[in-house]
Image: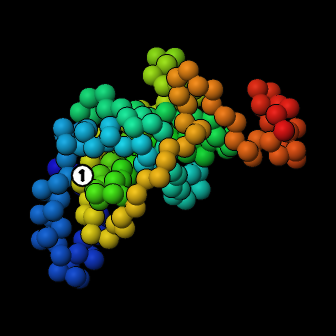
Amino acid sequence: MSNLYGEQHLKLQQFFDTDRLAEAVKSNIVTQEILDEHKLFIESRDMFFLSTIDHRGYPTCSYKGGDIGFVKVLDNKTLVFPNFDGNGMFLSMGNISKNPNIGLLFMDFEKPHRVRVHGKATVHREPEYTNLYLEANIVVKVEITEIFINCTRYVHRYKKLGQSKYVPKENCPTPLPQWKRIDNLQASLPDRDKNIA
């Protein structure tokens, strides 16, 4: 079974008399594979939060968005998601290249519902991966370590108002972001984006 809890967690659980509860919760919800209920939920999402760790040991959290189903479950141990054009910093992708341990949080703010995923990630630029997605420059493959449904008691309810116009779509040119039109950035843009101000 998963070693989800370390000494630091057990001490707090014992102090607050939740050690039996925490063990029961873990036994009932934490699995090492993607169940059908997880797959259906993950593939119905158009966003998630990605947690990675940088070269200094700092955790960083990033919002990742796309069309519904942009995270694909390949089998009961593996999922993939794309990285699209961004600000050129490649913070999350670079972090994964250095430290493969990641966390993903899939949310439904309207129901509410959430699923947490821990896994080992690798970045791929080979066509067999990038061809899975329109305009993906990298695809992240995640081997699942742990996955579980998480309590939604404190999740605030929100309603989606619209889809980002920057998500790549078939037969529709993806608009350039406004920040790439800033005059002071023109000299620093990659060649493909030059002279768009």
**Local crowd at mark 1 within 10 Å, few (<14), some, or many (≥20)?**
many
The x, y position of residue 137, in whole percent, is: 58, 28
The x, y position of residue 112, in whole percent, is: 29, 59
| Residue 5 in sight | no
Tell me the residue that label 1 is attached to.
148
Q: For mark 1, give the secondary structure.
A: strand
Quarter of the view holding residue 136: top right
Residue 81 vs 153, above or below: the answer is above
Front residue of 85/167: it is: 167
Front residue of 172/182: it is: 172
The x, y position of residue 88, in whole percent, is: 69, 40
Quarter of the view holding residue 178: top right
Residue 107 vs 6, above or below: the answer is above
Quarter of the image containing the C terminus? top right
Horizontal side of residue 185 vs 16, given as left or right? right
Residue 71 vs 10, above or below: the answer is above
| Residue 169 in sight | yes
Looking at this view, name the residue that lies furthest to the top.
128
Name the residue located 19 percent from the left edge and 43 percent from the top edge.
Answer: 37
Name the residue located 43 percent from the left edge and 53 percent from the top edge.
Answer: 160
The x, y position of residue 105, in whole percent, is: 38, 52
Front residue of 163/127: it is: 163
Residue 69 vs 157, above or below: the answer is above
Name the residue located 24 percent from the left edge and 43 percent from the top edge.
Answer: 38
Horizontal side of residue 158 vs 13, given as left or right? right
- The three-letter code of the residue at mark 1 reads Phe
